[in-house]
Amino acid sequence: AQSVTQLGSHVSVSEGALVLLRCNYSSSVPPYLFWYVQYPNQGLQLLLKYTSAATLVKGINGFEAEFKKSETSFHLTKPSAHMSDAAEYFCAVSSNAGGTSYGKLTFGQGTILTVHP
Amino acid sequence: SAVISQKPSRDICQRGTSLTIQCQVDSQVTMMFWYRQQPGQSLTLIATANQGSEATYESGFVIDKFPISRPNLTFSTLTVSNMSPEDSSIYLCSVVKLVASYEQFFGPGTRLTVL
């Protein structure tokens, strides 16, 4: 069984400040981990993914995330927030066991990021 | 990447009726899925749409309520049957183009309101 916990349903930062969105996962097998962003009235866009290669993963729009097995975490960061980063962010986990588990994502509850001028 | 379109983009339906949602991809994909996002909640996987065979449903979802078709590698439909207000959600189609890419793409969603 897998689960994802995103700490903080709402995060507010000032423009130019560090963005830190927290994600902890639980998985009985080595996981694949993903961050998606959802802008208002739009579908989900993949920001980045961890698939058991480098633990520090760089994504689009200046975001990155670090896989820490010991902490079962995959926190998303961006050094300097931009107004256009305001959106809802979802962390998701998938099993890398393949077969019938492939592509079945378990999502966290989402974190709404607000960026103040 | 994969460009995914869904029809309709939104609809308002009466209790007891059914709605069929279409998902069209611009290129052949390996896997297709249907997810539900209830108001204020996260996404939940409904089922895997299998080409030419019955869909594989997750716990809590059944074929009679959510019949799914996938006649080819670029198209799938999800029907929400005998709707109730609890079915009001955003329904999203998702695809994996290449298994080795580990990339899963999502459509824009269909926003369904049941009165």
Image: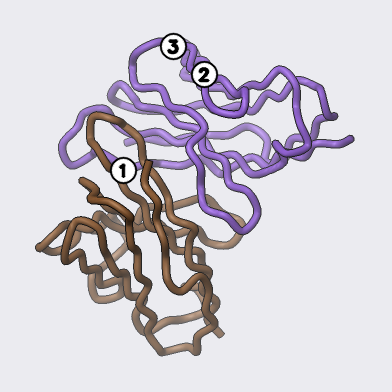
Chain colours: A purple, B brown
Q: What type is the residue that disc 2 sits on?
A: Lys
Compare marks 3 and 1 and give the one earlier in the sequence: 3
As drawn, is B22 to the left or to the right of A7? left
Give the quadrant of the N terminus of chain A: top left
Q: What type is the residue that disc 3 sits on?
A: Thr
Image disc number at residue A58: 2
**Closer mark to the observer between disc 1 and disc 2:** 2
Q: Could one spot residue A91 in this view of the protein?
A: yes
Q: Chain of mark 3?
A: A
Residue denoted by label 1:
A104
Q: Chain of mark 1?
A: A
Q: Residues within 10 Å of mark 3 (few under 14, many from 20)?
A: some
Secondary element at tag 1: loop
Give the quadrant of the C terminus of chain A: top right
Secondary element at tag 2: strand
Image disc number at residue A55: 3
- Do the residues at discs 3 and 1 belong to one chain? yes
Q: Could one spot residue B56 in this view of the protein?
A: no
**Residue B12 percent coordinates (x, y):** 54, 82
- Do the residues at discs 1 and 2 belong to one chain? yes
Residue closest to the far front = B26
